[in-house]
Amino acid sequence: MADSVVLDPVDLHILRLLQNDARTTYRELAAEVGVAPSTCLDRVARLRRSGVILGHRLRLDPARIGRGLEALLSVQVRPHRRELIGPFVERIRALPESRALFHLTGPDDYLVHVAVADTADLQRLVLDEFTSQREVARVETRLIFQQWECGPLLPPAATAPGRTEESE
Amino acid sequence: MADSVVLDPVDLHILRLLQNDARTTYRELAAEVGVAPSTCLDRVARLRRSGVILGHRLRLDPARIGRGLEALLSVQVRPHRRELIGPFVERIRALPESRALFHLTGPDDYLVHVAVADTADLQRLVLDEFTSQREVARVETRLIFQQWECGPLLPPAATAPGRTEESE
DNA sequence: GCTGAAAGACTTTAAGT
DNA sequence: ACTTAAAGTCTTTCAGC
């Protein structure tokens, strides 16, 4: 399930550049990597087809659009059965406050990353969308002081690059 | 700090479309929103200048590049002082396995989202980069079964859109 | 602040290696 | 699988409103 894809040094270089700025043009990629623009186009198209590249996302600053407070909510859903967790997941995903949702091992079943206006807004969200729901057995709220996105995602051993398992 | 920006319905419409696909062309945006392409260009440039749009990111599938196992590590850093947490944060951010890092309220100071090859790789990471470090008092590892990104990030009350606090 | 049109840049195709 | 070159499309500027 979801086998790895073979990536050569050209693919890795392109992925590294595009992760820094996904709007880098094929001409720029070509100049940096040392191949023709049409080759970059081919490579990127292949990376999309093979499922390595899932899409292009806009990064917004939540604080600039009135969501200056972020938090992580740990949630226990009981009983933890498919007929309850399916609707729970869909309901949480649809909340305008939700940024990400994780189904986890451990005593807390879900972790929800939310962005809200302020503590009053957070309290409203927790009370109205979580603790008031029958399937939610427990919620623990932690505020996010600060967060960082980390360096480009590359295959293991990309320091000595190019080696990955085979597939496709 | 990080005041909200005024967004009119045109801005909101553009942001919604670009969050669905950040590569949507100005011509397409223009057709959807009902303004000229050059107006969309102006709007997007203004959203970048005002800090609402932070950048364009490539979304990759970690499983396709040999990182088929993801986990969240809760970490206590003790003593929790600036001279220790600064280097800790920089070290964790620089790990190729790190996807995101959060500084949180609560008993666990940091949450680290990592992507690794398998459980052996995860064990190596936890032992070599976390529990072996002087400043790391405790690590709790939870595996990610499944994760979801959630709908477009919009201002509070974007159902009745357009109202946000003033700035700039 | 928006429009429309022109100029320039980039993307994409296709033939050739 | 890559390259070059040409055609098509998109971006970007700017004069005018």
Image (tube, coloured by chain):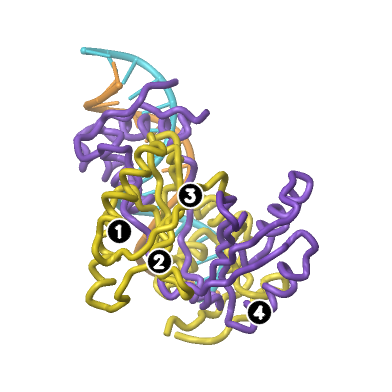
Chain colours: A purple, B yellow, C cyan, D orange
Which of labels 2 and 4 is toward the front?
2
Which of labels 3 and 4 is toward the front?
4
Q: Could you tell me the amino acid type at mark 4?
A: Gln
Which residue is labeled 4 in the image?
A123
In the picture, measured across the screen, residue B54 lies left or right of residue B136, that is right
The chain letter under disc 2 is B
Q: Could you tell me the amino acid type at mark 3?
A: Arg
Circle 4 residues within 10 Å: few <14, some 14–19, many ≥20: few
Front position in the image: A52 or A33: A52
User: Callout 1: helix, strand or loop?
Assistant: helix
Q: Could you tell me the amino acid type at mark 1?
A: Ile
Which residue is labeled 3 in the image?
B23
Would you place residue A158 above or below residue A130 in this image? above
User: Is disc 1 in the same subunit as disc 2?
Assistant: yes
User: Is disc 3 in the same subunit as disc 1?
Assistant: yes
Going 64% across and 76% down the picture, which residue do you hit? B162
User: Callout 4: helix, strand or loop?
Assistant: helix
Q: Could you tell me the amino acid type at mark 2?
A: Tyr
Which residue is labeled 1 in the image?
B92
Q: Give percent across and percent down for residue A14.
A: 30, 40
